[in-house]
């Protein structure tokens, strides 16, 4: 059995040749050079980082319209955060730091602070090392997708003895190779106000405002996915649980590629050669059936598969020890 499953997928803009790059206030587009041959270098662009792609992959298994997992993931546990009125706020599936997110940690389960609940479930104690397998088993029962996309309880050793960390088992990113800028611009019109007033300028949204835009074209756009099967096996979970994690990861990759990929308004990408995907990944329907079968085989490992509903009161809840 291979220790990694790797997939490179060529993408192209759905319409035209230009695409909007990622941008950062202090950096701008994430440009870099890669070596080509013995002596040459090629201008490239990091279109989506590993962190961003983790969020895009997680979004495939979440139905934003109803604030709940899609049907294929409905029987996997997670932490659901609600307000004091019972209305949905967020979850361990949608927060960037998952189980270690502030909204999760600062919530309460039946009046008990979630820091203490998680610490108790993970069996964290001062001066008492916890086996990684036991950590993985506890995380699997809280939200198994944290074992796919990673979680780090980094607040402090006093809060999280041992500061357990799970690295990403599924890593993805998108690069554009041999890029060139495509510079354009425009103007925001104002057909009502033709002169600038003291309190009605561009800052307030009035007047004619010219702007520039830099998009890019590329010879190749490649999405890379790597599933670390060795890491999944290293958790020491029962075989059905390990297989479930691998199937869930493949499902997310397949769903993302089947649905097209639009990370930004003017960056709408589609797969160039679907046969290259079919050669590595089963159809989505087959992966869905596989997930359903594996969920049934995992039994009590998934703690019933129901979400843990916790209440966030604005972060005002005082820590209260979990019952032992």
Image (cartoon, grey):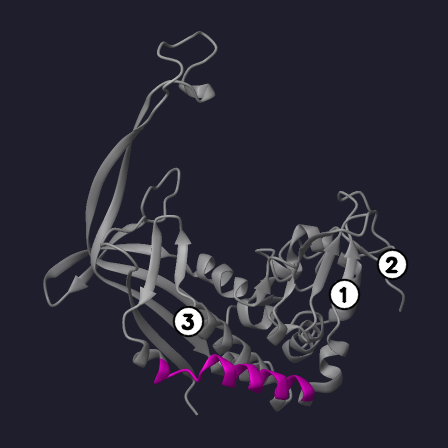
Task: Determine which residue is flagged by label 1.
Answer: 308
Q: Is residue 290 above or below residue 49?
A: below
Circle 1: is it few (<14), some (14-19), or many (20+) Cα within 10 Å? some
Determine which of the numbered discs, if any, sits on residue 110 in the image. 2
Task: Determine which residue is flagged by label 3.
Answer: 258
Are circles 1 and 3 on residues that touch, CB within 8 Å? no
> Where residue 55 sits in the image (x, y, percent)?
51, 59
CA distance for labels 1 and 3: 31 Å
Q: Nearer the viewer, residue 4 or 195?
A: 195
Q: Residue furthest toward the front? A: 192
Disc 1 secondary structure class: strand
Q: Is residue 25 above or below residue 63?
A: above
Residue 26, by quadrant, is: top left
Between label 2 and label 3, give the one nearer the viewer.
3
Magenta span main SS: helix
Name the quadrant of the C terminus.
bottom right
> Where residue 219 sits in the image (x, y, percent)?
18, 60
């Amino acid at each position: 059995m291979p220790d990694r499953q790797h997939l490179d997928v060529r993408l192209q803009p759905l319409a035209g040749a230009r695409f909007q790059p990622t941008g950062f206030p202090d950096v701008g587009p994430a440009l870099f050079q890669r070596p080509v041959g013995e002596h040459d270098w090629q201008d490239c662009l990091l279109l989506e980082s590993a962190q961003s792609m983790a969020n895009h992959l997680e979004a495939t298994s979440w139905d934003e319209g109803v604030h709940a997992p899609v049907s294929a993931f409905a029987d996997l546990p997670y932490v659901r955060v609600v307000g004091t009125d019972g209305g949905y706020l967020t979850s361990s599936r949608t927060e960037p730091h998952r189980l270690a997110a502030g909204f999760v940690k600062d919530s309460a389960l039946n009046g008990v602070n979630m820091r203490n609940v998680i610490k108790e479930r993970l069996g964290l104690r001062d001066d008492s090392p916890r086996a990684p397998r036991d950590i993985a088993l506890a995380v699997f029962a809280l939200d198994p997708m944290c074992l796919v996309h990673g979680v780090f309880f980094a607040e402090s050793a006093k809060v999280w003895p041992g500061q357990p960390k799970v690295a990403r088992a599924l890593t993805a990113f998108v690069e554009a190779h041999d890029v060139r800028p495509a510079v354009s611009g425009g103007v925001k019109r104002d057909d009502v106000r033709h002169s600038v007033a003291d309190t009605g300028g561009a800052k307030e949204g009035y007047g004619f405002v010219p702007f520039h835009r830099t998009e890019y074209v590329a010879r190749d756009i490649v999405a890379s996915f790597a599933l670390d099967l060795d890491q999944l096996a290293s958790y020491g979970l029962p075989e059905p649980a390990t297989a479930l994690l691998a199937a869930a990861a493949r499902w997310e990759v397949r769903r993302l590629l089947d649905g097209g990929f639009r990370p930004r308004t003017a960056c709408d990408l589609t797969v160039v050669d679907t046969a290259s995907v079919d050669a590595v990944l089963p159809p989505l329907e087959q992966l869905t059936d596989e997930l359903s079968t594996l969920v049934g085989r995992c039994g009590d490992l998934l703690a019933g598969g129901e979400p843990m509903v916790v209440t966030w009161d604005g972060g005002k809840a005082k820590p209260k020890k979990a019952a032992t």
